[in-house]
Amino acid sequence: MRTGCSGIKKILLAASAAALVFASACSQAEPPPTIAVSITDSIFFSPSVASGRVEAGRDFTTVLDMLPGYEFVSCDYDGEYASSVDSDGNVTLTLRNVTAPARVTVLSQEVYRQSEREVINCSITYDYNGGTVAGQAAQSETRQYTLTEHIRPNTWNGQELERGGYTLLGWNTSAEGDGEHIGLGSRVTVPDGQSITLYAEWVQWLPEDDFLYRALPDGTAALTGYRGSGDADMFVIPAEADGRAVTEIASSFTTNIPCGAISSPVLVLPDTVVSLKSGAFGNSAFSEIYFFDNLESVSDTAFPNNISTYHLNAALPPHYQAVNNSAYYADNVDRLIVNADKKKLVFFAGCSFAYGVNSNMADNMFGGEYVVCNMGVNGDINGAFQMEIILSCLGEGDILVHSPEQMSAPQLMSSFYLDGRMFIMIEGNYDLLSIPDFSDNDLIFRAYMHYAEIRGREEPCSYSDGRTESFNEYGDFTYPRPYDEATENERDVTYSDDKYNFAPEMLTEEGVAKLAGYYAAAEDAGAKVYITYAPVNSSAQTAVSVEEAGESFDARFKQLLAPYGYAPISDYRDYIYPGRYFYDSDYHLNDYGAIMRTVQLIKDLQAAGV
């Protein structure tokens, strides 16, 4: 019996074991169900796990390596999700409790955080230095400035300040006039929260007896002749003749004058003069002039020679500070001026840099060593004028990155045409006009007259106005220009009516020689120069393809630069992009295009040794 029972027991045990083995085999053959999850492709990030399967109810996690300049915003996962950002900007995305198949689209956006501009408080004491203000016994006054739009204050234009027999030429940091000269209405550097004293800078009129005049119907006077020696260091026109305000210099002024010709190098016009007639200074050789922005009419033949240095004082309020982007140029220059003792990384071109570089990215890469400054405003405005102002601010250790636009004759120095826009650029700081050498340009007064004409189309504004809603602290144009992945293929089109392309015909020997001269001047100041390319739309509708024109342009540019020892650091092909990366023209990049271009430019600069 025992033996039988034992056998039965063994059989039962064996059967149980077999059942367990069978159950285990079934369990291995049928694993728990899993659910598919994937992340929709995007140019803005690379996921560490683009797709996979998870058990029902489990979490799915991936790390998004974000494109520089972009950040995670949200995703369209139906359930709960969590996101976190590490110090490198990578985003860990976790989809919670996955219970159904999911194809998740992630929304990204450009990282744009306009730095909160520091409010600058300062004061300026204006010492009348021998002058008076009607009804006041005081010899000076102090004005307080709270700056939000600019980093340097505009000075008082001194219109109420008078001194008999003298013209107010500007302000000076020295009472003796041997310090820094600041034009009336122009800007001066004042440390934050501190104050400085500026002294009225007076120049004495030449004797009234040296001038002949005739009375005009409005009761003012026109100077009709001169009988002095004409050799004073400064030829200072009197503001009055026999008690009448001098408003005109007549055509006969230097005709048959006893001294033969005026040899004085500097001409000073008072703020009463509004008209210079044809041939007014025919027998003169002025190389420098001071005048006021209420001058209304200047004949093309008022002077027999080109004047090299112009000083413009403000008698009128500004008109463009609040309404024109070109007016921001003066603010860009201010950034160079206040950082004179620091090393600077300066981007210069036309608006292809204003729209086409992300200076914050450059600052993140190079900002530990350089102050980043974007000087690109308008490539159609005289490039030599802009370049000479920039060069005056460069010093030891600075870097100039020049991207001459391939269809901009002014940037390529093959054209030096000027118009009123030049004065719009410097309206916020007329002193910038005195920096360039205009001895080879006879269009300055014509450009000024254009400015005086168009200025009347805008309402007067204030120097406290500005364009900080359109530009960031680096000088980048910040109006949103979003890139849409969903319609990218539909946007590979041209945006310009003028068929923008590389223009090798604009490269001239004289123009490139001028460019090379500026590059050499920058190096003489201790700066380094790197030449790169502006972006061009490969979708542009042109007779010659962008690629073919680019090859011709590149070859000719290198050929003309070679004798001077310069060459581009960039491959032009790296800056040809489809239309989807442009905004409203074939050289204005959208936000994503600007980041693409900046990534490439940083690579080029690093390869060149920056």
Image (cartoon, rainbow, N blue to C red):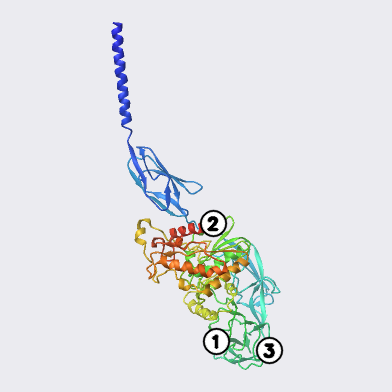
Residue 146 visible within the image = no
Note whether 564 is above or below 270 in the view shown.
above
Q: Which residue is mark 3?
A: 229
Neighbourhood count class around disc 1 (C-alpha, 10 Å): few under 14, some 14–19, many 20 upward: some
**487 left or right of 448 in image:** left
Place of residue 383 in the rendered image (x, y in percent of width and height, measured from the top left): 52, 72
**For the residues bearing labels 2 and 3, Cβ distance under 8 angstroms:** no
Q: Residue at x 45, y 48 (%)?
A: 65
Q: Which residue is mark 1?
A: 301
| SS under mark 2 | helix
Q: Residues within 10 Å of mark 2 (few under 14, many from 20)?
A: few
Q: Which of the 4 image quarters holds residue 233?
A: bottom right
**Residue 346, visible in the rendered structure:** yes
Q: Quadrant of the N terminus?
A: top left
Residue highlighted by disc 2: 606
Q: Which sits earlier in the primary sequence, circle 1 or circle 3?
A: 3
- Label 3 secondary element: loop
610 w.r.t. 457: above or below: above
